[in-house]
Amino acid sequence: MTQTIAEIHAKLLPLVSKEFELPVTTNKGLPGILLEDLLGIPHTPNCLDCLDGELKLFPVKALKNGTLVPKETIAITMLSTDELLTHDFKSSRVCKKISRMLIVPYCRNGDTITFMNPKIIDITFGEFDDLYNILENDYNEIRKMYIETGVLSSRSGTLLQNRTKGSGHGSTTRAFYMRQIFMKKYIPLCF
């Protein structure tokens, strides 16, 4: 049974600040799989994890002065050049994936991880009107460059970017990502 973002959020809150055993591995997706299992989210090929949105995680690191910062970007979805040519932002897969997200930062300490306070981001809701406009502009910039030049550049986009996905520098597969500046601006990093 697929759940709503609100139901998942309610189930997640008691897990915040608790340590979970998760040995270090090269598979960056394991924290997400662990959290999906803890929350009862089935592993499916569906576009969205929940009835009304998507669950996204990202790792956090502490700087020497103790300040918590995002360790890396958030992978959103694979980029299809065919879709980029034919879909505006509103009808795109990336818009569907980021319209309503439950975003969960987490810290790693050796072989354990600790989930931090989650944040629901709904770009269709008034509070995040500015965010919707920025993301739409980013998508349009990426799309326009590809339509006009046939080139995809990771430099395009303020918050939303596209870049290669996969191991090594020779990868030709591309995906959409949220830049770290997105998390710094919209996701409070606290327990």
Image (cartoon, rainbow, N blue to C red):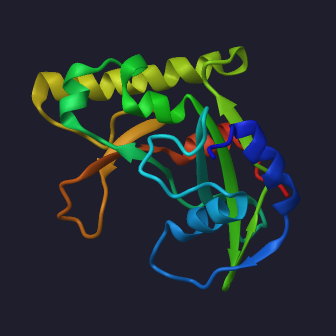
Measured along the vertical axis of the image, is residue 82 above or below residue 124? below
Q: Report whether 172 appears left or right of 78.
A: left
Measured along the vertical axis of the image, is residue 154 above or below residue 99? below
Horizontal and vertical percent position of residue 175: 33, 47
Residue found 75% across the figure and 76% down from its top? 20
Residue extending farthest to the right is 14
Residue extending farthest to the front is 1
Horizontal and vertical percent position of residue 12: 79, 54
Q: Quadrant of the C terminus?
A: bottom right
Of 102 and 135, the residue lying toward us: 102
Horizontal and vertical percent position of residue 100: 61, 31
Horizontal and vertical percent position of residue 121: 67, 33
Q: Report whether 6 appears left or right of 50.
A: right
Image-quadrant location for residue 31? bottom right
Residue found 22% across the figure and 38% down from its top? 152
Residue found 61% across the figure and 47% down from its top? 55
Measured along the vertical axis of the image, is residue 39 above or below residue 78? below
Residue found 66% across the figure and 38% down from its top? 185
Image-quadrant location for residue 111? bottom right
Instruction: Kindly tell me whether residue 101 is visible in this rendering.
Output: yes
Of 83 and 153, the residue lying toward us: 83
Of 126 and 61, the residue lying toward us: 126
Image-quadrant location for residue 166? bottom left
Measured along the vertical axis of the image, is residue 166 above or below residue 134? below
